[in-house]
Amino acid sequence: MFIENKVFTPQEARLQAIADGIVTISIPEEYPEDVNAPQAKNPVPNKRDYMGNPVPPSLGGQGEVRLSDAFTREVDKYVEVEDIYLRKLVRSIIPIMQSEVSKVIALFDDEEGIDLWNEWYDDVLWGDVVDDDIPALTKSTIRNSQKTLLNILKTDKMWNKSVDMPDILKDLVELYRKSRVDYLTRKSELEYELGKIPEIIREFPNDPESEKQFSEAMKEKVKKFFDEFSKNMTKSVISGVRKYLSTHYDAEMTDINDSMIKLVRIELYNLRNAMVEQFAQDTLETIQTILKE
């Protein structure tokens, strides 16, 4: 209570407890810094944790959509890359961003102001701010940074990748087949329970027509995903670089350190997680739509 009401600090309360004999075991007066260190409030999920979404009982109650290994492998080609490739992207936009960052640092003399600016800037990047409310300098910085990054992504052999569409679709069709069997089995169980059929049907032949419909629909979604992912990568890189510069500003910066690359990589992980989760949801909805037709 005293700590919550800010009467004592945790360290003062610790010392008082020792002095009063409340603590009977031998403990150091200083709390060890390496014990139960606070964790980040929004840690980046493990890359395997975001690959599923709940599946309703109408689709067999599997619990989640498991996207294909082929899809995961293709996405990771853009994220699980060596630092040198991220360094090239970062280095290309530092000169563009330094002007705006230096003005903001001169405007805000406290960490809270910088944090609020960074939050607002992310909203701008992801389209959550009305265009009329965005300063011309910010528009120019984002536009020129994205243009520079997109040029590298399109011309550098490292980033100019082709997507293994056949393998991705093969795995997705297999997912559809399993979902279809689960759906039809559950439907058969209900009909048996209601006395409409004498026994439960558990084996079903493949349906080439609906599989083709699903494959064609997903081909467009996969293509759209990777087109958008490439474009959104520019926003993630801009966000990581901006956040580093605004808290470690150096007008003469020529060296790109590991901390900046780590920030950029975290932004890319967050992008991947969010977009893959949305893709999993879109896949589930496509399966549901076709099965209910």
Image (cartoon, rainbow, N blue to C red):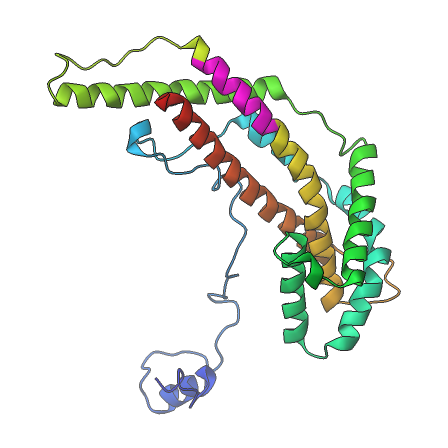
Residue 255 in view: no
Q: Residue at the location (64% across, 46% down)?
A: 268
Quarter of the image that includes the C terminus: top left
Residue 147 in view: yes
Viewer-proximal residue among 226 and 1: 226
Magenta range is 210-222
Dominant SS of magenta comes to helix
Q: Position of residue 52 (x, y in %)?
A: 44, 37
Left or right: residue 260 versus residue 112 is right
Identify the image quadrant of residue 166: top right
Q: Is residue 290 above or below residue 25?
A: above
Q: Position of residue 71 (x, y in %)?
A: 57, 28
Q: Is residue 218 magenta?
A: yes
Q: Is residue 120 magenta?
A: no
Identify the image quadrant of residue 153: top right
Q: Is residue 160 above or below residue 92?
A: above
Left or right: residue 262 versus residue 6 is right
Number of marks in the rendered image:
0
Quarter of the image that includes the N terminus: bottom left
Viewer-proximal residue among 141 and 153: 141
Viewer-proximal residue among 201 and 194: 194
Left or right: residue 38 versus residue 202 is right
Q: Is residue 256 above or below residue 49?
A: below
Q: Residue at the location (47% across, 30% down)?
A: 283
Identify the image quadrant of residue 168: top right
Q: Residue at the location (19% across, 15% down)?
A: 200
Q: Position of residue 194 (x, y in %)?
A: 12, 22
Q: Position of residue 193 (x, y in %)?
A: 13, 23
